[in-house]
Image (cartoon, rainbow, N blue to C red):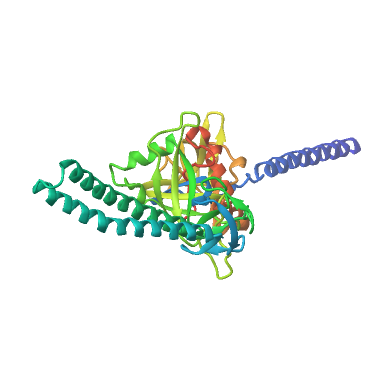
Amino acid sequence: MNSSNRLRSQAALQSLLLAALLGSLGLGCKKKSETPTAPPTEVTVAEVEQRTIPMIFDFSGTLKAVRRIEIIPRVSGYVEERYFDEGSFVEEGDLLYLIDPRPFEAALQAAKAQLGKSRADARYLDVRARRYTTLAEEQVASLELRDEAVSKAAENRAQIKLDVANVETAKLNLGYTKIQAPFAGRMQQTNINEGELVTAQETALTELVQIDPIYAIFSLSRTQMFQIQQRNPTGMASNTEGQYAAEIMLPNRKPYDKTGTVDFLSAQIDPTTDMITARAVFDNTIDDTDNMTLIPGQYVPVRLNVGQQSDAILVPEVAVMETQVGGHVFVVDAENKVSQKMVEVERAYDNHYVVRPGTLKAGDRVITQGALKVKPGDTVKPVTQSQTSGTSGTGSTGATGESGPTEGAPAKASGAGGSGPGSPEGGN
């Protein structure tokens, strides 16, 4: 009996142990099957745009005075007076220097006296010529005396013309003692002071620089010129250089408040640089204290608007990644699947890249943040810029489009036609 009870107890214990073992195995499997899957990676996306944009090129330019001349005397003499302050502005016709006029006044008086003598002689010689002509006709005087009298009268008339010219020359030389500004501009330092001797057509007294208007000199690459020429037949760019609007950026990175126009474009390419020289003219702002905004010799970034580009495909700069095989973007489709597409960048514009059509179209969603976390084929959770908390991060990237990055950006996609400074870009 006891033996039988023990067997039952052992059997019951074994059953309990087996049930507990099976229960633990089942619970483990249940926990394993209930492990959650990782959520889709969150990425920031922006839509590809297609619209008409201005065709803008940025260049490195240098300001140059429209006119810059040396003031050189036309007559020799001693400087008696200087009338201008160095560095001051003068108007056309303002008196700059006075050379001692007394020798030239005396020369003018002498020339006038000689003219008076010749005219007095003319009355006698004309009467004498007429008299001998009459006498010769009456055969009272010889022909030789008649010819001599007529010749003397003609010689005197020529002398009068010479004396008139000498008087005019003396007047000019006297006028040259007053050295005047040939145009409005700013005076440089004087090289000559009162009492010093100057030599005609030789001594440089000072320099006069015309400040307003002022030139901005820059150079276009052959590629940029070709892009402009391509759009001329379709009306996308002006075909007259005078219609090209230009603006320059001041040292504070703000645009100058006056727009200029291109008034010169070289007819040939410099073979040493493969560039074409161009020139834009701007009005120069000068305040009441003679301070000028634009100074000759100053470096300025020049921005040239040469027309419109219609149906341009615009991709945010931050969406384009550069590899050894070229630029590419990550595109998120309607099912939130990621795919990689190659793009060819034409130029930069307003924190975007203008890419060649064909690969992307308007409305495509490209990843602007989080691209390094995903790969083609992944499913992602796309959010727009306004939905993320990292607005300031992207905003700082966009803000630089006003100066540096837009100029350097095309170099990032050099395989797509960028050329660093001077590349066509945006910012208007």
* Any part of residue 247 in sight: yes
* Residue visible at 63% across and 45% down in the picture: 38
Q: Position of residue 261 (x, y in %)?
A: 41, 53
Residue at the limit of the structure toward the left, as seen here: 138
Nearest to the observer: residue 418 or residue 52: 418
Q: Position of residue 123 (x, y in %)?
A: 25, 58
Q: How many marks?
A: 0
Residue at the limit of the structure toward the front, as seen here: 140
Asked whether, in this view, residue 296 is left or right of residue 142, the answer is right
Q: Position of residue 140 (x, y in %)?
A: 12, 47
Does residue 269 lie above or below 148 as drawn?
above
Asked whether, in this view, residue 240 is left or right of residue 33, the answer is left
Nearest to the observer: residue 82 or residue 102: 102
Residue 97: image quadrant is bottom right
* Residue visible at 43% across and 35% down in the picture: 223
* Any part of residue 50 in sight: no
Q: Position of residue 336 (x, y in %)?
A: 50, 45
* Residue visible at 19% across and 41% down in the picture: 144
Residue at the limit of the structure toward the right, as seen here: 2
Which quadrant of the rendered structure holds the N terminus? Answer: top right
Nearest to the observer: residue 261 or residue 30: 261
